Structure formats: structure tokens, C-alpha cells
């Protein structure tokens, strides 16, 4: 939660910024950039995995993480052990979180596709902790940019209501399932999702369909 609140400062500011400048930005360029970012993140995550049975690299807390106590521990039921981890390169992760929020506000999508790989690859946060922290941040990030869009009358409540219901149900069952699978498996699933979303976003950006 400490890590989530720290990164949320950057992500929320980025989301609000993105929402304000959305009308004057080329959607095609954004989709291409975002698609390439997702493909790059999936490659890095796949490359980092190697033959390790862990979903992260062991890191020590950097100076900022040590002062803010960003490192944490949790019990992993799938591994049957308590996982303790540090957070490194906090400033880089903070900056990328701003970019994730900016894209979230511009494209109306969650920044988890960028935040999760960033926490996992750059800062050395275990996959389960990265996914959980990203989920913890999503509500605030989305609400910040949504307020701007609602004020300008862009939100369609008839579409929003059923989507929210489906998302709540899906996230509930997804979170419960994630507790019982190993982090490396979760990481592989995430890599596939990033590949699919990245290719889909690129195809949309170049008007293939």
C-alpha cells in the first residue's frame, strides 16, 4: 500500500494531464506508441524470466524506498512461504508511472499494462505484489481522469453501468484465482495478454481493422 500511494502521486497527475490534453492529441500516434510499449514490456518480462522459478529479481531497497518503507512482505500460498522484497530505482518507476497515468487519461484504459511490468522489471517487485499494487491504484487513477471527462459530457452512463458490473465480477474472481497460482505462471499469462493487447493496439493505430 505504501508503494501504491507513492506511485499514485505520479499516476494521478499523469491521468488528469492526459484527460485535459486528450482533445488535441492524435489518437493514431498514441495507439501506436502504446502498442509498441506493451510489446516492449512483454519482451523484457519474457527475457527476464530465463530459467528462474521466481517472478522477480531479488533487490535491496534504495534510499527513497528505505526512507518511505516501500519494501514489504506477504505470504504466498502457492509457494507456501513468506516473500520479502525490496524496491529499487524508485525515481525511474515514479516517472514511468506518470507516463502510465498520462496514457491512461488519454486513451481511457488502465495503466496496469505499463505499471505492472515497471514495478516487476525496474523495481524488482514480485509479480503478485505488482499486480495487487496496480489494482489498488487503478480506482484513484481512473476516477481522477473520469471526473474531467464527465465534466465535459463524454461519459455514457448506459454503457458504463453494465461494464462496471462485469469488471467488478471479473476482477473479484481473477483476484481469488491469482492467490492460488505461482507468480511465474501469472507472469507468463501477463506476457501473453500484453502481446495480444500490444498487437491489437498497433493494428488499430494503423487502421488494419
Image (cartoon, helix red, strand yellow):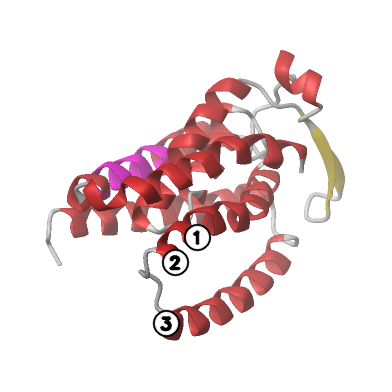
Residue 181 in the image: x percent, y percent?
70, 59
Front position among marks 3 and 1: 1
The magenta-colored residue range is 31-42
What residue appears at the point 61 percent right and 28 percent down from the top-left corner? 123
Asked if disc 2 and disc 1 are in contact, CB closer than 8 Å, the reply is: yes
Please identify the quadrant where the C terminus is shown. Answer: bottom left
Residue closest to the eye, 62 or 138: 138
What residue appears at the point 36 percent right and 37 percent down from the top-left corner? 40
Is residue 109 on the magenta stretch? no
**Which disc is residue 159 wearing?**
3
Front position among marks 2 and 3: 2
Please identify the quadrant where the N terminus is shown. Answer: top right
Mark 3: few, some, or many residues within 10 Å (few <14, many ≥20)? few
Question: In the figure, 45 relative to 59: above or below?
Answer: below
Kindly identify which residue carries mark 1: 147
Mark 2: few, some, or many residues within 10 Å (few <14, many ≥20)? few
Q: Seen in the image, is 173 located left or right of residue 161?
A: right
Residue 21 in the image: x percent, y percent?
32, 45
Amino acid at each position: 500500500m505504501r508503494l501504491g500511494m507513492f506511485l499514485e502521486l505520479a499516476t494521478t497527475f499523469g491521468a488528469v494531464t492526459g484527460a485535459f490534453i486528450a482533445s488535441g492529441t492524435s489518437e493514431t500516434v498514441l495507439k501506436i506508441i502504446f502498442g509498441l510499449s506493451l510489446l516492449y514490456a512483454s519482451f523484457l518480462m519474457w527475457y527476464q524470466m530465463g530459467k528462474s522459478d521466481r517472478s522477480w529479481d531479488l533487490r535491496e531497497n534504495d534510499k527513497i524506498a528505505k526512507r518511505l518503507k516501500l519494501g514489504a512482505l506477504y505470504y504466498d500460498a502457492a509457494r507456501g512461504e513468506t516473500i520479502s522484497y525490496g524496491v529499487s530505482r524508485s525515481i525511474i518507476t515514479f516517472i514511468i508511472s506518470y507516463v502510465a497515468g498520462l496514457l491512461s487519461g488519454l486513451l481511457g484504459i488502465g495503466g496496469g499494462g505499463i505499471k505492472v511490468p515497471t514495478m516487476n522489471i525496474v523495481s524488482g517487485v514480485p509479480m503478485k505484489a505488482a499486480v495487487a499494487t496496480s489494482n489498488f491504484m487503478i480506482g484513484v487513477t481512473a476516477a481522477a481522469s473520469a471526473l474531467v471527462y464527465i465534466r465535459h459530457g463524454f461519459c455514457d452512463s448506459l454503457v458504463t453501468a453494465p461494464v462496471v458490473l462485469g469488471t467488478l465480477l471479473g476482477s473479484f474472481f481473477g483476484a481469488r484465482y491469482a492467490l492460488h497460482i505461482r507468480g511465474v505462471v501469472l507472469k507468463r499469462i501477463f506476457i501473453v495478454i500484453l502481446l495480444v493487447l500490444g498487437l491489437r493496439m498497433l493494428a488499430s493505430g494503423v487502421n488494419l481493422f
